[in-house]
Image (spheres, rainbow, N blue to C red):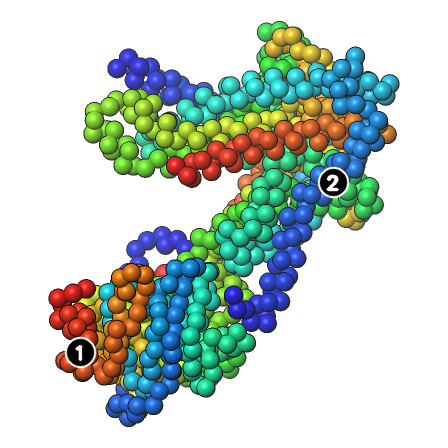
Amino acid sequence: MFKNVLTTVLIWLTALIVSGVFVWLLSDIVIHGLPRLSWAFLAEAPKNAGRSGGIGPIIISTLSILLVAMVTATPLSLATAVLLSEFTENDSVIGRLVRRSLDVLAGVPSIVFGLFGNAFFCIYLGLGFSILSGGLTLACMVLPILIRTAEEGLQATPDDYRLAAAALGMSRSATLVHLLLPSAAPALIAGLMLGVGRAVAETAALIFTSGYVDRMPDSLLDSGRALSVHIYDLSMNVAGGDTNAYSSALMLILLLLIINSIAMSLAKQWLHRDIVLYE
Amino acid sequence: MKLNGPVKPMNETYTLGPLQIGPPCCDPEPLIRVDNLSLYYGVKPALENVSLDIYKGCITALIGPSGCGKTSFLSVLNRMTDMIPDCRVSGKVHFNGRDLRDLALDVQGLRRDIGMIFQKPVPFPLSIRRNIELPLREHGISKQAELNDVIQQVLQDVGLWVEVKDRLESSALALSGGQQQRLCIARALALKPKVLLMDEPCSALDPISSGVVEDLIQRLRGKYTVVIVTHNLAQARRIANYAGFFWIRDQQRAGCLIEFGQCKQIFEAPAHELTAAYVNGSRG
Amino acid sequence: MSLSLADKQLAALLWGCALLAAALVLLVLLFLFKESWPVLQHIALIRFFNDTSWHPVDGLYKLTPMLSATFYSTLGAVMLAAPLGIASALFSRYYAPSFLAGCYRRLIELLAGIPSVVYGFWGLTTLAPLIGRLHPPGVSLLTGILVLTLMILPTIALTADAALAAVPAAYLRGAASLGLSRWGLISGVTLPAARPGVTAGIMLAAGRAIGETMAVLMVAGNVVQQPHSLYDSVRTLTANIALEMAYATGDHRAALFVSGLALMCVVLLLVGMAELMSQERRHV
């Protein structure tokens, strides 16, 4: 009886502490970050090593890196997921091999991806410190998540659809395009969101691939500083950079939320284009 | 696919439209000839040495207890067996002068000629119109006027037209079970098949819907060749011209065909004692 | 499997993509090896442990201070986060009223998505000064452990929550019908049943803690030394790579790649163990 009461108290206490710390963290960032946050801050270039000025070029760089990463990783992961779920038996040797190697890739620490990206994209392929190198490195990093979620989404679509479509003489490609992918769309988008979230949050893999340069990038082959790298640099290497670092951190969190909600509404529209669930 | 709320069935009204029907019963010309067919899942035989003819324009009922290979037999006829891993088929199945087991056969074309209806209705999560349109477009029909004609035609054939003509753009999932099954039949008819395979098309439906679908199947006689698997002996007796009785061979647990013949003969004067016991209800 | 021409073309394309994706991990390993090779070739592995210090420019490659920093910070974080995470999962599943449980779960999910650099930044500006007041310098092993704890807590809480959810309701009904108290129920039935899933989650979280760079880099002080107390500044393996890659050349650079390779091996070992455990669960 005593144990029961004690554990109840402890568990409520844990929940209270955990929520308390997290509210502390979030409110800290909002309180310190909000005053500086304005349209001017978002548009301006950083001045005086980032102590003053805004984060305009940094947002552009971040979005470009993200774009490169998702444009590369999405088709590749969708194709792999379709192959694994629609064109191979669940326990085939080759399917297991592909899945296992993706599991391994998912476990690789991001700093190791940074090392790899630096050695392969920057130096071996000669892309240098560039948005392209950073984006491609992130693409490798998010690939396993995208594939896993897309595969799960496809496998969750009813087998009846596959059988009924086959019985109507439809090709697998048509079944995929007209039935399975639209049915799995919410799961696919959710997976994409996870990937985007991880890519936006990533810092370690970008320091040695997309670089530190904080001016407006001219092209994808130009170096560009991601928002997360900016926060790191301001807080560690720039004395007096904390105010702007707070605002950048708030912006990073807001960016994550914005991307999330945009994708949700896109998913809904895509869903309603063809699939009609009920009245 | 997740549904956020219960799907509300519409009021189902019984409105079978006129169906152009061919000669009332069969000319005994075999359309599909099955010769010594066996089917294995891995090494385990599911069906052994089945030989029978499916007659053109007739309704052939396949009866027998669960697990005796009736559904497996159906899926050989439109090569759905291809979708089952480790499934192996031996013997001869002739349709249109070709062996269905021919690997070079155009399977998509075959499935257009031999349609299939499943036990559970499988409307796609699309609008009613798209459900019928999608396979038609896949088979190369893309003119909207032509599509509209076919859609109206087949929906009239299955008696759904009056019920859904004002709501072709709404979800097929909102239809009641019986309406869904009729939509699936309409979808299959739209491809102008020669044969319709039906795997217990009424058993997942309530009695009233089941009656409507059964009437519909009756009306397909003559124009289409129908092979129907059913557990409902009374239904088989009511609608079929020919009947085949499947049973499980004891040693191997493999299904086999015990007797095949005119429906009347199977039910009234079965040649085999097992058949007699089964149709009398004393076994199975 | 019979496929039409279009399907075959699609399948070929998909195979190409899938093999590319699967080969990626080999490519990563290949390049880590390639870049490590200059050092591995002429330096015995033992020198990474036996050298007098880490002065790669002078050819001294002692990695043990970094290894122990990584080890202690991970160990500390897991020891703190595991009970907190499990308690969080228990809270949202069994203790909190459903509304509160939903909110709490959303909060944890939100936290799982917060970038590590934000955790690091917050630790540096808020946590480190607080700890510095207790015992300077503030940026220390303890701060690193606390920030890592916050970072991996959501992982443990969410996996434990999923594992608890997977415990069959029948167990709970059975136990409750025996009149067990809530804690008796949890400690006697739920937690043992969910243990494989919970353990796998902790393994994954440990892997994340070992591989985490930014958060510890920003709060742990980055002094290369064997830690003697929780208040000592330390530098982890990952932080070392991030700090020195910018200017490392030649053997120094190669040595950093060796530590990357080592990191990858340790994490893979953990992922493998987590995998084994979840497989065990599937077989039960």
User: Which residue corresponds to the image point at 18% horizontal and 82% vertical from the top-left?
Assistant: B265
Residue B124 is at least partly visible in this image: no
- Between marks 2 and 1 in the image, the one whose residue lies nearer the viewer: 1
The N terminus of chain B sits in image quarter: bottom left
In the rendered view, tell whether residue A118 sits above or below residue B166. Answer: above
Q: Secondary structure at mark 1?
A: loop
Q: Secondary structure at mark 2?
A: helix
Q: In the image, which disc is placed on residue A200?
A: none
Query: Residue at 50% across / 51% down in the picture?
Result: A91
A9 versus B160 height, above or below = above
Q: Amino acid at mark 2?
A: Leu
Judging from the image, mark 1 belongs to the subunit labelled: B
Pick whichever, A65 or C176, lies toward us: C176
Residue B63 image position (x, y, % from top left): 24, 71
**B284 over B103 or under it: above or below:** above
In-image side of B150 versus B25 (left or right):
right
In this image, A250 relative to C245: left or right?
left
Q: In the drawing, what numbered circle is on residue B270? A: 1
Q: CA distance from mark 2 to mark 1?
A: 73 Å
Q: Quadrant location of residue C74?
A: top right
Q: Position of residue C180 (x, y in %)?
A: 24, 23
- Report which quarter residue B112 is drawn in: bottom left
Residue A59 shows in the view: yes
| x and y percentages locating residue B38 in the rendered image | 39, 70
Quarter of the figure that contains the C terminus of chain B: bottom left
Label 1, residues with CA under 10 Å away: few <14, some 14-19, many ≥20: many
* Chain letter of the residue beneath label 2 in the structure image: C
Determine whether, in the image, residue C117 is placed left or right of residue B107.
right
Q: How many marks?
A: 2
Residue C30: assigned label: 2
Name the residue: 50% across, 52% down: A90
For the residue marked with disc 1, what is the amino acid?
Pro
